[in-house]
Image (cartoon, rainbow, N blue to C red):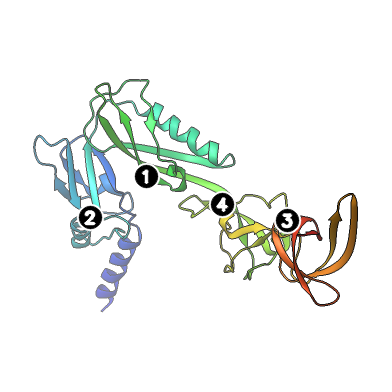
């Protein structure tokens, strides 16, 4: 009984030590071992043999996962469907790494980049030292992606990249409902690994007053699309209504029945309960239309 428990414990420990499988690897020798893929597995065993003469090779990630399983280990393949192997070359990718670095730092000046890896999708012997990566406009939205370089013949050479970085991002420190004004009392800065954001993550509070355009959960990263400028006229607020007739300007007090930003057309209610259209011209100030 003790022996059986010990075996279970050892298998569990071995499984816990294994890592996440990446999408792309390079190889020098055609025989691929477990240690070439992950560092956490305590055993070293052969995974596969790249066919002779192949400079690139693609294999289903589940096949690799099964090989680890048969040897008492496991790897996380939930985010990887296929694994690509590319033969190592003397290709200098440092200029491409620098271009990616510049692109990310331009969008996120406060980002702390630990590592950028660049892998050619196919076997590329060499590239001009002046080669420029062609990036999609949203390439900096993710910590991994694809770009291409035009070689001297005008052929597109594709590359994959992965980025390891951290970023200070505002988070909600409580459940927040729609139309709540963003403030230090309902947010906190957290340093988190950079992954994927559907919008621009905020590192500081906006300079102007903003409110949430949607409800969000507690401890959720805040991106720009969650916010909208705070209207300068709020529904139910008393507003100064201007009426201009030639050089004469008459003002009276009304009630806004709608909220509005600068130059929005809203409905106001006069003291006699009649309603009219008015243009927002300032904070709690409107001009009768």
Residue depicted at 60% across the width and 51% down the height: 202
Neighbor class of circle 1 (other Cα within 10 Å; few <14, some 14-19, many 20+) is some
Q: Secondary structure at mark 2?
A: helix
Q: Gap between marks 4 and 2, in whole Å?
A: 32 Å
Q: Which mark, residue 61?
A: 2
Q: Which residue is mark 3?
A: 209
Q: Is residue 270 left or right of residue 226?
A: right
Q: Residue at x 55, y 48 (%)?
A: 167
Please say if the residues under marks 3 and 1 sit with CB atoms less than 8 Å apart. Answer: no
Question: Which comes sooner in the sequence, label 4 or label 3?
Answer: 4
Residue under label 1, please give it: 145
- Badge 4: few (under 14), some or many (20 or more) residues near its Cα, within 10 Å? many
Q: In the figure, 168 relative to 265: above or below?
A: above
Sequence-wise, which precedes: disc 1 or disc 2?
A: 2
Numbered disc 4: secondary structure = loop
Indicate the quadrant containing the N terminus: top left, top right, bottom left or bottom right. Answer: bottom left
Rate crowding at label 3 as few (under 14), some (14 to 19) or many (20 or more) other CA atoms within 10 Å.
some
Spatial separation of the CA atoms under disc 4 and disc 3? 17 Å
């Amino acid at each position: 009984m003790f022996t059986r428990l010990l075996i279970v414990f050892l298998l569990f420990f071995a499984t816990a030590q294994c890592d996440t499988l990446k999408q792309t690897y390079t190889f020098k020798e055609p025989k691929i071992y477990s240690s070439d893929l992950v560092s956490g597995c305590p055993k070293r065993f052969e995974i596969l043999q790249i066919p002779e003469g192949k400079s690139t090779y693609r294999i289903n990630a589940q096949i690799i996962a099964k090989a680890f399983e048969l040897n008492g280990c496991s790897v996380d393949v939930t985010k990887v469907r296929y694994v690509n192997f590319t033969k190592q070359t003397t290709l200098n990718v440092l200029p491409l790494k620098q271009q990616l670095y510049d692109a990310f730092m331009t969008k996120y000046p406060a980002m702390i980049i630990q590592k950028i890896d660049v892998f050619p999708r196919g076997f590329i012997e060499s590239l001009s030292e002046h080669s420029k990566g062609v990036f999609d406009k949203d390439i900096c939205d993710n910590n991994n992606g694809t770009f291409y370089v035009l070689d001297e013949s005008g052929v597109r050479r594709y590359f994959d990249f992965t980025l390891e970085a951290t970023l200070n991002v505002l988070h909600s420190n409580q459940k927040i409902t729609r139309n709540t004004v963003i403030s230090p009392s309902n947010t906190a800065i957290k340093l988190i690994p950079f992954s994927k954001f559907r919008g621009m993550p905020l590192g500081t509070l906006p300079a102007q007053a903003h409110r949430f355009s949607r409800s969000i959960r507690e401890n959720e990263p805040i991106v720009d699309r969650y916010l909208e400028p705070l209207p300068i006229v709020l529904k139910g607020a008393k507003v100064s209504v201007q009426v201009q007739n030639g050089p004469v300007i008459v003002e009276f007090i009304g009630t806004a029945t709608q909220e509005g930003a600068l130059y929005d057309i809203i409905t106001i209610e006069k003291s006699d309960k009649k309603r009219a259209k008015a243009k927002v011209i300032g904070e709690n100030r409107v001009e009768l239309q």
